[in-house]
């Protein structure tokens, strides 16, 4: 993965989990995860912009121990396959997550404590289908930059 810029935007991480696991996910409690593919959609519209993706990679690799978001608890148990980014100043996180959720199974309550979405984390056992769903959701919302 190449380093991201400090431009604002929305991102979706495509992750792989090789085995079933239960883990504590912050205030959500203990959740069970099946082996397969997960997509997590987040917002990076703050001062660091899309460098937030780099921070998530550091958490995944064990280089950063701070757990701030739900995804921080899941990342160390996964491999990053791809990161989709949409450079935008618009708040499209929920729209992109909802569009992905039309095609993939939501993990209820994950990553959406500050909105009314069902989830910002989605599951599939079909990687090509996941990549298509995520790519299409980001493509439909384009870029305003």
Image (spheres, grey):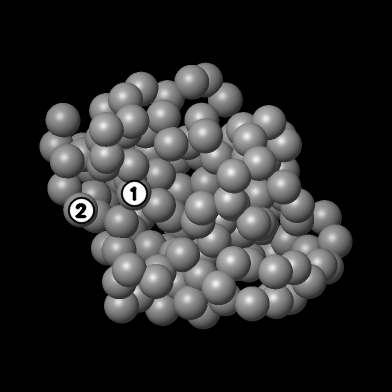
Q: Position of residue 142 (x, y in %)?
A: 23, 42
Camera-nearest residue between 13 and 73: 73
Circle 1 sits in a helix, a strand or a loop, which is it?
A: strand
116 to 132, vertically: above or below:
below
Q: Is 115 left, or right, of 120 in this rendering?
A: left
Where the C terminus falls, by quadrant? top left
Q: Residue furthest right?
A: 19
Reading the image, the residue beneath label 1 is 43
Q: Residue at left 20%, top 53%?
A: 91
Q: Name the residue: 24% across, 55% down.
A: 92
Of residue 10 and residue 37, the one placed in the foreground of this image is 10
Whether pointer 1 and pointer 2 mark residues with C-beta atoms closer than 8 Å, the reply is: yes
* Quarter of the view holding residue 32: bottom right
Which residue is pictured at 14% across the width and 37% down the height? 144
In this rendering, position of residue 74 left or right of residue 114: right
In the displayed structure image, the side of residue 43 where residue 103 appears, left or right = right
Residue 26 rendering spot, x and y as whole percentages: 59, 67
Q: Secondary structure at mark 2?
A: loop
Image quarter of residue 56: top right
Residue nearest the viewer, comparing 138 with 64 = 64
**Residue at label 2?**
91
* Horizontal arrangement in the rendering, residue 110 relative to residue 144 (left or right): right
Relative to 32, say whether 57 is above or below: above
């Amino acid at each position: 993965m190449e380093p991201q810029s400090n431009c604002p935007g929305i991102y979706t991480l495509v992750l792989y989990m090789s085995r079933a696991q239960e883990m504590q996910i912050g205030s959500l409690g203990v959740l069970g995860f099946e082996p397969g593919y997960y997509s997590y959609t987040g917002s990076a519209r703050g001062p660091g912009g899309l460098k937030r993706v780099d921070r998530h990679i550091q958490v995944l690799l064990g280089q950063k121990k701070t757990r701030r978001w739900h995804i921080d608890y899941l990342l160390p148990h996964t491999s990053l396959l791809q990161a989709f980014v949409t450079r935008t100043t618009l708040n499209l996180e929920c729209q992109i997550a909802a569009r992905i959720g039309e095609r993939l199974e939501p993990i209820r309550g994950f990553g959406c404590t500050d909105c009314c979405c069902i989830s910002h984390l989605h599951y599939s056992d079909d990687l090509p289908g996941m990549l298509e769903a995520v790519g299409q959701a980001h493509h439909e919302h384009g870029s305003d930059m």
